[in-house]
Amino acid sequence: MATVFFSYSHADEDLRNKLEEHLALLKRQGFVEAWHDRRLKAGDEVDPGISEALERADVILLLVSSAFLASNYCYEREMDRALERHAEGSARVIPVILRHCDWMSSPFGKLLAAPRDGKPVTAWPDIDEAMVDVVRKIRDALPKADAPRQASAGASARAPAAPARDLPRSSNLRLPKRFTEADRDRFLDEAFEYLARFFEGSLEELQARNEGIETTFRRIDANRFSAVIYRAGKAVSRGSVVRGGMFGHGISWAASDRADTNSCNDYLLAEVDDQVLHFKPGAMGSYGGNDKRKLTQEGAAEYLWDQMMQPLQRS
């Protein structure tokens, strides 16, 4: 059984939990066991415990974000040693890009990252799809049963560690993360601001790329904005986005630029699973309430932009 070590910032613990949840099948099949610093028990010495786990890991995941890059412990202690072991051939390092950050100029920038094309997990429309892609990369990187494992030079240079207690334990140790009303409100505020910037930038680019197309973006107030697309001077598509609206904890969409808070054509509800906040498409969309995707704010933006583009693309 291969050991998978998580090197991560505690600011990204929710995404680490989500990734570990997606490793469940690999665990059940007996291919991997996961290790991170939350596995340390009361009374354990933190630095030696982490160092020992890092030395015996077969696969080391660098969960990359701006918080990871800013962490001296992650960057200078865990990452440096992980890359040494990768160069030795005693472990495989996989950068997992969680959020947009300047990672490509880092020492691990030359390594093939996950998810696909190094696209951050939070930039995928469906966070579960991103996690599945990461798990496939991990599965492919697992050491083969008949491949001899090269000893770590760093491990042999250190004083021998006390033997670990190899007790049986359950893999069912993850607890649900609790989100407060303040967490939900912050999630909605940040998502709405992202949506406004996304629409404004997309409208500008649409006009710049296509002759005969004009666009307008209007920020009405802190909770509403509207957009119009014209072709040859005629309005072809109108839309407005409202934070809250008639459904309260969510984002509503209307195919008009009036930004009415009491009516909409579609909506996205802010919901939680046991690890992350996400958006769930409402019952008014093309899936008729059967859309089970868990959308990030990027996914929500693409979902609503599709609504804006449909009249233009059909005309």
Image (tube, grey):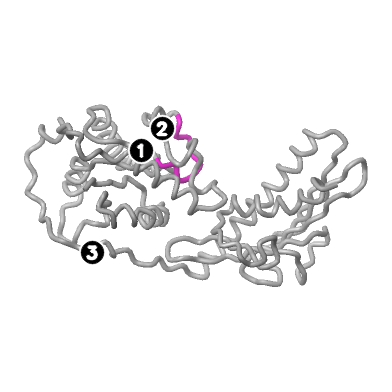
| Residues in magenta, as a range | 96-104
The picture quadrant where one finds residue 184 is: bottom right
Of badges 1 and 3, the one in the foreground is 3
| Mark 1 / mark 3, whichever is N-terminal | 1
Amino acid type, mark 2: Leu
Question: What residue sits 38% from the left and 67% below the top?
Answer: 176
Q: Nearer the viewer, residue 37 or 118?
A: 118
Rendered view: 296 above or below 269: above
> Is 103 included in the stretch rendered in magenta?
yes
For label 1, the residue is 94
| Mark 2 / mark 3, whichever is N-terminal | 2
The answer to whether marks 1 and 2 mark residues whose Cβ atoms lie closer than 8 Å is yes
> Is 84 included in the stretch rendered in magenta?
no
Q: Of helix, strand and loop, which mostly describes the magenta segment?
A: loop
Q: Nearer the viewer, residue 234 or 43?
A: 234
For label 2, the residue is 112
Q: Regarding mark 2 in the picture, which secondary structure is present there? A: loop
Amino acid type, mark 1: Ile
Amino acid type, mark 3: Ser
Rendered view: 202 above or below 252: above
Residue 196 visible somewhere in the drawing:
yes
Question: What residue sits 71% from the left and 50% below the top?
Answer: 305
| Mark 1 / mark 2, whichever is N-terminal | 1
90 relative to 126 in the view: left or right: left
Q: Regarding mark 1 in the picture, which secondary structure is present there? A: strand
How many residues crowd around disc 1 within 10 Å: few (fewer than 14), some, or many (20 or more)? many
For label 3, the residue is 170
